[in-house]
Image (cartoon, rainbow, N blue to C red):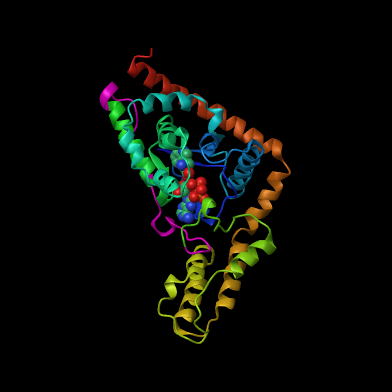
């Protein structure tokens, strides 16, 4: 089984990225042949500073390796080290109906927010389809917001197979129900573009301040809260605390007697502890960038060899060869 996913180097990675995509991806590396990449071509649709892109790319590599991506089990690489994917994206775009892309929520949301769209932003899902199809991927672990893009990939692959004969494997999205949509500090979906993130790695004081600043309602500590499971701090605590600890806090909130300050402090402490080992590992990696760059170089060579096989298949099927 081939497992594949990507993540954009468009800003510091956060708990939504971690629980929605990175953790499931890391768990899956035991289950098959995993390919994970840093989607730097995709980041060009929203980030226009070269220095930032270079730095973010390195940061994503460090974050992912620190969190448990094991380069002995998974092929880890930078998207643009396999330029073949852009050729495949062109081929796929010739069979992609405009309407299919016009219906994509992520595109529509950005346009609704007033962003003046580039052709690259519009064509984003076609490049993503090429990413997935060029490695014969079976399973694509992503958060809920990327599900539609994997469905678009399936549509495009079916269309190509129908037009030119069986060429591509049809992939399946894999979404973990309980962490499909991690909320941010404002209760909306946590996202780099909404400025509501809790970073995986960051400065202790700033993160403590962010968590202690979570907005709660005005009910007093003694008041029972029958809606305890909807409390934002409880939802986040369930991700980072042992289940019995989270359950205990939820019950205390439900029946009254737990103040929001104490709850938020527990959230910060559990969050900070959750990533303690990863923080140590990240510092070690940051002091050994030759190793990190070597991992990406080796990953790119392996990924490129695979990509060439599938691209050649598509070139033959479509009469380019
Ligand atoms: P962002 O919205 O912060 O820009 P990306 O689009 O780079 O995040 O997402 C990278 C991966 O992380 C994707 O698989 C996406 O579905 C997942 N992801 C991002 N935010 C969340 C969230 N709040 N909850 C669950 N998964 C998320
Ligand atoms: N669009 C994805 C995101 O923003 C990143 C991505 C690019 C991706 N290509 C992919 C994810 C292929 C899975 C498979 O999160």
Q: Position of residue 175 (x, y in %)?
A: 39, 50
In the displayed structure image, the side of residue 288 where residue 302 appears, left or right: left
Q: Is residue 100 magenta?
A: no
Q: Quadrant of the N terminus?
A: top left
Q: Relative to the observer, which residue lies in front, 188 or 153? A: 188
Q: Is residue 320 above or below residue 157?
A: above
Q: Is residue 38 above or below residue 314?
A: below
Residue extent of the magenta highlight: 162-187
Q: Relative to the observer, which residue lies in front, 217 or 169? A: 217
Q: Is residue 188 above or below residue 5?
A: below
Q: Residue furthest right?
A: 287
Residue located 29% across and 25% down the image:
166
Residue located 29% across and 32% down the image:
158
Q: Position of residue 131 (x, y in %)?
A: 45, 33
Q: Position of residue 89 (x, y in %)?
A: 42, 28
Q: Is residue 183 magenta?
A: yes
Q: Is residue 187 in view from this perspective?
A: yes
Q: Is residue 25 in view from this perspective?
A: no
In the displayed structure image, the side of residue 62 where residue 247 appears, left or right: left
Q: Position of residue 34 (x, y in %)?
A: 48, 39
Q: Residue furthest top?
A: 321
Q: Quadrant of the C terminus?
A: top left
Q: Residue furthest bottom?
A: 222
Image quadrant where residue 293 sits? top right
Q: Relative to the observer, which residue lies in front, 243 or 159? A: 159
The overriding secondary structure of the stretch rendered in magenta is loop
How many numbered discs, if any? 0
Residue located 31% across and 37% down the image:
99
């Amino acid at each position: 089984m081939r497992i594949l996913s990507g993540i954009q180097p468009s800003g510091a990675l956060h708990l939504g990225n971690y629980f929605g995509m990175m953790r499931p991806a890391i768990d899956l590396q035991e289950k098959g042949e995993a390919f994970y990449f840093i989607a730097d071509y995709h980041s060009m649709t929203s980030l226009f500073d070269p220095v930032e892109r270079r730095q973010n790319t390195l940061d994503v590599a460090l974050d992912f390796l620190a969190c448990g991506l094991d380069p002995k089990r998974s092929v880890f690489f930078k998207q643009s080290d396999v330029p073949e994917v852009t050729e495949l994206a062109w081929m796929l775009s010739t069979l992609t109906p405009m309407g299919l892309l016009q219906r994509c929520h992520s595109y529509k949301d950005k346009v609704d927010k007033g962003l003046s769209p580039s052709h690259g932003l519009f064509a984003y899902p076609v490049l993503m389809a090429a990413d997935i199809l060029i490695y014969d991927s079976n399973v694509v672990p992503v958060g809920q917001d990327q599900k539609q893009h994997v469905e678009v990939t399936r549509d495009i692959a079916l269309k190509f197979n129908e037009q030119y004969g069986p060429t591509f494997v049809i992939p399946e999205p894999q979404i973990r129900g309980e962490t499909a949509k991690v909320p941010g500090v404002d209760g909306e979906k946590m996202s780099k573009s909404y400025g509501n993130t809790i970073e995986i790695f960051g400065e202790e004081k700033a993160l403590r301040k962010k968590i202690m600043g979570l907005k709660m309602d005005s009910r007093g500590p003694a008041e029972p809260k029958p809606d305890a499971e909807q409390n934002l701090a409880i939802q986040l605590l369930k991700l980072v605390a042992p289940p019995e600890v989270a359950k205990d806090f939820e019950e205390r909130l439900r029946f009254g007697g737990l103040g929001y300050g104490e709850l938020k402090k527990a959230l910060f402490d559990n969050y900070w502890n959750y990533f303690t080992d990863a923080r140590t590992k990240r510092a070690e990696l940051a002091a050994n960038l030759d190793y990190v760059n070597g991992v990406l170089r080796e990953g790119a060579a392996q990924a490129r060899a695979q990509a060439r096989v599938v691209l050649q298949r598509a070139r033959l099927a479509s009469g380019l060869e």
